[in-house]
């Protein structure tokens, strides 16, 4: 009787432990562990879902991460989201394209987590909107440089007579005025300066007929 109760207790503790998760930092990488089917202990968890793959921390150390045990995957998702959001935000808000790409990587990882709270869902949407803004600004700056380089290539093509010189000259005449206006618009968009065109007034409906 006693041995049977002890065996049942060990089984129940093992089953409960096998449903738990924990986070561990190994050489600047966050690794998810899943509990073993034993009363205690865990091992690295490598599911097919890439949302739970190891996370490069890039020097960030989550506070008290190795002292918490999560009872289920919903608790794990919430904790993992906080870490991914912390990694994503400063990189997304950066002016450097490479850092923005890293930020988007962490953001995409966070979007794969299904068990986050409503508050975290709202934060995720806000961060995605911020990412879109800063990514658009970066692409505008890159587009400006690309267009400048393109015009310089056409100009270079006209400096020494060759079979393409007439086409290059025609391209310069056609593009340069438009590109100047486009560059001005890009500058205003990047700096948030300049006057916007006036909004079109809504057409006025006909008023009531004059009273007799």
Image (cartoon, rainbow, N blue to C red):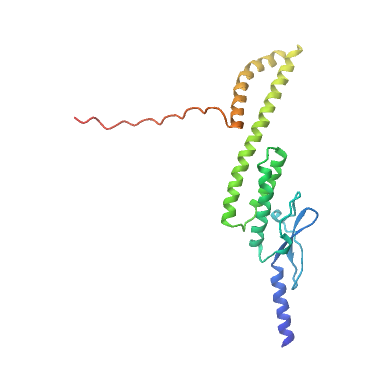
From the viewer's perspective, tell me whether residue 2 is left or right of residue 206. Answer: right
Asked whether the viewer can see residue 130, the reply is yes
x, y percent for residue 142: 68, 31
x, y percent for residue 86: 67, 50
- Name the residue rendered at 61%, 28% in the picture: 187
Residue 163 falls in image quadrant: top right
In this view, the residue farthest toward the top is 161
In this view, the residue farthest toward the front is 63
Please name whichever residue, 80 or 150, is drawn nearer the observer in this view of the structure: 80
In this view, the residue farthest toward the right is 27
- Name the residue rendered at 21%, 31% in the picture: 211
Establish if 145 lies above or below 78. above
From the viewer's perspective, tell me whether residue 185 is left or right of residue 155. Answer: left
Quadrant in which the C terminus is drawn? top left
x, y percent for residue 41: 77, 69
Residue 19 falls in image quadrant: bottom right
Give the number of marks: 0
Quadrant in which the N terminus is drawn? bottom right
In this view, the residue farthest toward the left is 212
Residue 31 falls in image quadrant: bottom right
Asked whether the viewer can see residue 164, the reply is no
Establish if 34 lies above or below 206. below
Establish if 34 lies above or below 174. below
x, y percent for residue 43: 77, 64
């Amino acid at each position: 009787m006693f041995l049977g109760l002890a065996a049942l207790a060990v089984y129940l503790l093992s089953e409960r432990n096998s449903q738990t998760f924990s986070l561990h930092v190994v050489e600047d990488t966050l690794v998810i562990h899943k509990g073993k089917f034993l009363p205690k202990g865990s091992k690295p968890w490598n599911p097919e879902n890439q949302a739970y793959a190891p996370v490069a921390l890039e020097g960030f150390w989550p506070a008290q991460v190795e002292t918490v045990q999560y009872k289920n995957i919903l608790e794990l998702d919430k904790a993992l989201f906080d870490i991914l959001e912390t990694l994503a935000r400063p990189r997304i808000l950066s002016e450097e394209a490479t850092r923005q790409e890293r930020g988007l990587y962490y953001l995409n990882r966070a979007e794969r987590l299904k068990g986050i709270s409503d508050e975290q869902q709202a934060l995720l949407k806000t961060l995605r909107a911020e990412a879109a803004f800063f990514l658009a600004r970066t692409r505008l700056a890159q587009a400006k440089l690309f267009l400048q380089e393109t015009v310089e290539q056409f100009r270079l093509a006209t400096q020494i007579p060759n079979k393409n010189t007439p086409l290059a000259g025609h391209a310069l005449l056609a593009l340069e005025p438009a590109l100047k206006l486009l560059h001005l618009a890009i500058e205003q968009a990047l700096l948030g300066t300049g006057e916007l065109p006036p909004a079109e007034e809504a057409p006025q409906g006909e008023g009531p007929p004059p009273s007799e």
